[in-house]
Image (tube, rainbow, N blue to C red):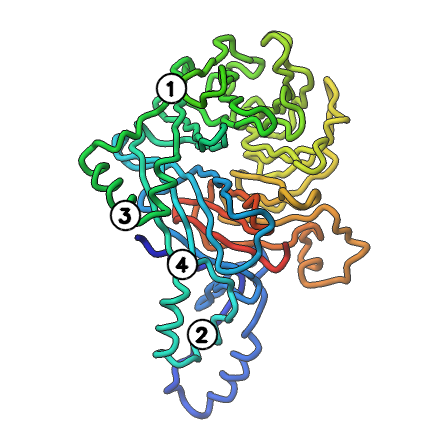
Amino acid sequence: MDKVDEPMAEDEIREEDEDDEDDEEDMEDEESDEKEEQGKIYLPGQPLEKGEELVADRSAYRLLHQAQTGAPCLSFDIIRDDAGNSREAYPMSMYILAGTQAARTHMNNLLVMKMSNLHATTRSSEDSDAEDSDSDDEDDEARAPVMTVASIKHQGCVNRVRCTHVGNKVLAASWSELGRVSLWDLNEQLRAIDDPLLLSNYRKRTEQGDNGAKPIFTFKGHLQEGYGLDWCPTEEGSLASGDFKGNIHIWHLSGSSGGQDWYVDQRPYNSHAPHSVEDLQWSPNERHVLASCSVDKSIKIWDTRASPQAACMLTATEAHGADVNVISWNRKESRFLVSGGDDGILHIWDLRQFRPTGTKPVATFKQHTSPITSVEWNPDEATVFASAGADDQIAQWDLSVEADNMEETDIQLAGLPPQLLFIHQGQTDVKELHWHPQCPGILISTAHSGFNVFRTISV
C-alpha cells in the first residue's frame, strides 16, 4: 500500500531564518525584522522577494493531504460509497476513480483508489516543528494517510473519466486519446481495495496479464478523440460523449442488466461542428436536458427527445472571448450554470435569460490569470462553487457575499472580489477538481504534481 504524503500548499510567506552566528550588534534589528514578517498574508499576484517562500497556513484548513500516483492523472471522479452522507467524523475514507496520462500509450491505467485514515489538521506547522521528535514519530505513523490502488490496463491516455451506479454495479466511462469511449465494471476492483488478500491476488493476476478487466462495451463511432463526458444523474445508464469534431452522441442502456446491452445513437448532435466539444453537463433535474460548451465560444442547451437537427434549444453565442473549457450545472438552483474559458474568466449564467443573441452573464469574475481548467458547484450550498486554473490556483467562491456587508480588509484593499473566499495553492498545472458528494466541504483536485484532498475553514 502506498502512503499519502503531507502537502505543500501555499498560502503564507515566511522569511528564511537569519544565520544564528550573525554579529551580535545586528541581532536585535534582525529579530525585529523577522517578527514583522512572520505571519504575513500572501495576496495573489504579489511578487516574492529574494529569500521568501510560500508555506501552508495549516490553521486555514480542516483537512489537508497530498497523494502521488506515478503517472499524472489529469481526470478523476469520486465513487459514491455506502458509508453514509454528510460525513464529518475523522479519520475519513473515500473512493476515487482516476485515469493516467503516461508517456507511453501502453503504460496507461484506470486507477480505482481508496484513501483512508485521513485525519483532520489539528496542529499548525510551527507547533509540529517544536514538539518532541520521538512522540511525534509514533503519532505521525498512527495518523499517516494510506492509499490503496487496484489498476486496470487502459489503451491510450485517459482524457476524461466518469463513474456512476447502474443497479448494483459501479460503472466507469473513459475517453481514450485513441478516439474511443469504453465502459468498465469496477466491482471487482472495489472489493479488492477493501480486502488485502483479494488485492494481493488481484495484483498477481494483473502482473500476469490475466485480471479479466476488459471493457464491457466500447464505442468507436467518434471521428476523433474528445473530452466531453457525463452520466445523467436522473436516468440510470444514460451517457453523453463529445469529441474534437463537435459531435455529441447519446448512450442508453437497453434493459436492466448493466452489462453489454448498450445503445449509442449514431446520429450526432453537431451544432458545435466543426469545433471541439470541451465539456458536457446533464441537467440535475431534467433527464432529457443537456448542456455543452465548445471551442466555438458558445454554450448550448439541448433537449435529447428531439431529433439531432432540432435538439439545440438555447444558445449563448460568444459566451467567452476564447474557448469555453468547462461548465457546471448548479444542483440546488438548476437555472444557474458557471463556465470557465481560455480567457481566464468565470461567468455565472441564468438560463432564463438565454437569448438567440446578446445573452449576458449575471456575474463575471476575473481572478485567475490563466485559462480555467475546472469548475464545480458545491453539492450542498447553492451559492458556493470552486474553480481551478492553469495559474496553479484553486479558488472557492460564495455568491451570497456582498461588499456592503464586509468590513474593509487587506483582501478588499487588494482589489479582490468579496465573493472570493479562499485560494489554495501548491499544485502544478491543476486539471480537475470535484467536491465530495458525501463529505461536506471536502475538495479533491488533480494536477501534474499529484492529488490534493482538503477542506478549508471557509466552506
Q: Is residue 100 visible?
A: no
Amino acid on which the number 2 mark rests in the picture = Ser
Distance of mark 2 from mark 4, alpha carbons?
Answer: 17 Å
Q: Mark 2 touching mark 1, by CB under 8 A? A: no
Q: Residue at x 44, y 68 (%)?
A: 51
Q: Mark 1 touching mark 4, by CB under 8 A? A: no
Judge from the rendering whether residue 108 lies leftward or rightward of residue 10; answer left or right: left
Q: Nearer the viewer, mark 2 or mark 4?
A: 4
Label for residue 145? 4
Q: Residues within 10 Å of mark 2 (few under 14, many from 20)?
A: few
Q: Mark 2 touching mark 3, by CB under 8 A? A: no
Residue bearing mark 2 = 128
Q: Residues within 10 Å of mark 1 (few under 14, many from 20)?
A: some
Distance of mark 1 from mark 4, alpha carbons?
Answer: 36 Å
Whichever of labels 1 and 4 marks the residue nearer the N terminus, that label is: 4
In the image, residue 387 sits, relative to residue 127, either above or below, namely above
Q: Nearer the viewer, mark 2 or mark 3?
A: 3
Distance of mark 2 from mark 3, alpha carbons?
Answer: 36 Å
Whichever of labels 2 and 1 marks the residue nearer the N terminus, that label is: 2
Residue bearing mark 1 = 218
Q: Residues within 10 Å of mark 4 (few under 14, many from 20)?
A: many
Q: Nearer the viewer, mark 3 or mark 1?
A: 3
Residue bearing mark 3 = 197
